[in-house]
Image (spheres, helix red, strand yellow):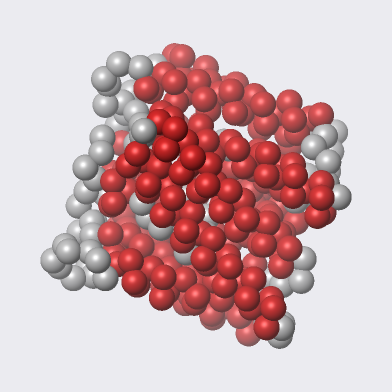
Amino acid sequence: MALRSIIFALLAFAFFATHDLIVKFLGGSYSPVQLIFFSSLMSFPLVTAMLMRDPTEGNLRPVNPWWVAARTLASVSAALCVFYAFSNLPLSQVYALLFAMPLLITVLSVPILGEKVGIHRWGAVVLGLCGVLVVLRPGSADLELGHLAGLMAALCSSFASVVVRRIGRQERSVVLMLYPLALNFLIMGSALAFVYKPMPIEHLGLVGLIAVSAFVAGLFLIAAYRAGEAAVVAPMQYSQIIWATIFGYTLFNETLDSATLIGTSLIILSGIYIVWRESRGRSNNTPVLRTRQRNQSPGAINISPFLRKKP
């Protein structure tokens, strides 16, 4: 079962990496607003087909309207920021910043979930944040708006994930999935007139692949968590740095410089240590292992409702 879980997780993050590759490729020609609008539009049929299987009775009114509103805005912000970051930074640098999510989830779980974090995990958070500083190299390298966008994407996505951990058992999956998708469509559609560029059919097809890649990745991630423990699945996200290195070098002439490599290694080590600490014993104080989301794509599946029977 562990091997199946690892394979499914690696496939999930390979599809996520493909999603990010296409975003970067198209981001050189089109605004993130336009890409998010069309990927949201093309995600609607996929998400709707999946939600038709939801047997839960009820309506589309959220049980926790303020938390749902905050999560929806955070998800929309995360999508916009990550599309911008991938369009303007090397793939490896964006992933290094997104890998800070376990650190941010650990921090945010204290005020939002009331979790208690021990000194070991706080130490891992500090180590990981040092890794972020190494990647950013303030004072020795030019910081771009893309770096801020990457950090904001990690922060907003972490916040959205922690909120799902708080309200996920009370809200219908249709509410958690459709609200961010609909708001992405409405906001980006309103701004589209200011940034729109005509797209040839092959580029529209690639936007369709963005939606499909996010959807298929979500399905594989659900399968991975159902087949194995979260402590096995969670570290597989770091396989994306391998894809970033391959794609960046072969397609965009990007190289993994020493500062990015060292900083990313520190961030990954801290994230793995947090997962390892949380997987020890039977404590319910496991915000990272229980927060199994990727909110940076408008078509990404909110997988938590489909895993409610798993701890």
| Residue 160 in view, yes or no | yes
Numbered disc total: 0
Q: What percent of the width, then of the height, locates residue 53? A: 24, 66
Considering only vertical position in the picture, is 292 above or below 76? above
Which is more toward the observer, 273 or 193?
Answer: 273
Image quarter in which the C terminus is found:
top left
Considering only vertical position in the picture, is 236 above or below 274? below
Which is more toward the observer, 143 or 260?
Answer: 260
- Give the residue displayed 71% in from the left and 67% down from the top: 26
- Give the residue displayed 60% in from the left and 58% down from the top: 19
Q: What percent of the width, then of the height, locates residue 67? A: 31, 54
- Give the residue displayed 70% in from the left and 45% down from the top: 244
Which is more toward the observer, 278 or 60?
Answer: 278
Residue 96 quadrant: top right
- Give the residue displayed 67% in from the left and 62% down from the top: 22
30 horizontally vs 276: left or right = right
Q: What percent of the width, then of the height, locates residue 290? A: 34, 36
49 horizontally vs 87: left or right = left
Image quarter in which the N terminus is found:
top left
| Residue 289 in view, yes or no | no
Residue 284 quadrant: top left
23 horizontally vs 36: left or right = right
Residue at the extreme left of the image, as rendered:
57
Q: What percent of the width, then of the height, locates residue 221? A: 43, 47
